[in-house]
Amino acid sequence: MKQRKMSDLVADAGIASVDMWILDCVGCELGALRTFDFENVPVRILNIKRNANDLEIERLLRHYHFEYVREQQGNRVYENSRWPGE
């Protein structure tokens, strides 16, 4: 099966923005985030399952203006500080 980028899936679905994205893909969260086009599809809240790549994920998300909010039942919650309208 051919792998697809998250941005392609979102574009195919006609999604212009994401209010809340819950991401738990068994250790490949960083890879999924790296294929997402945060510049063209704004995301307000990200809820990501904790894993070994937490520090790299946080670095990547800071680049796209996300701030760590809290830990919630084994997940890390981030909020986009540049969400349109905020």
Image (cartoon, rainbow, N blue to C red):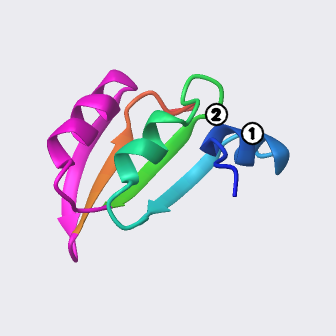
Between disc 2 and disc 1, whose residue precedes?
1
Task: Identify the residue under disc 1.
Answer: 16
Measuring from the top left, give residue 36's x and y in whole percent.
55, 36
Q: Are marks 2 and 1 in contact (CB under 8 Å)?
A: yes
In 3D space, how far apart are the residues under numbered discs 2 and 1 (Cα atoms)?
6 Å
Please tell me which residue is depicted at 22% across the width and 45% down the height of the picture: 68
Measuring from the top left, give residue 75's x and y in whole percent.
26, 66
Badge 1 density bin: few <14, some 14–19, many ≥20, Cα 10 Å: few
Q: Amino acid at mark 2?
A: Val
Task: Tell me: residue 83, above or below residue 12.
Answer: above
Measuring from the top left, give residue 6's x and y in whole percent.
61, 45
- Taking the image as shown, residue 80 lies to the left or right of residue 84, namely left
Task: Identify the residue under disc 2.
Answer: 41
- Taking the image as shown, residue 13 lies to the left or right of residue 49, namely right
Please, what secondary structure does the residue beneath circle 2 have?
loop
Measuring from the top left, give residue 20's x and y in whole percent.
52, 57
- Classify residue 7 by image quadrant: top right
Q: Which residues are magenta?
A: 49-74
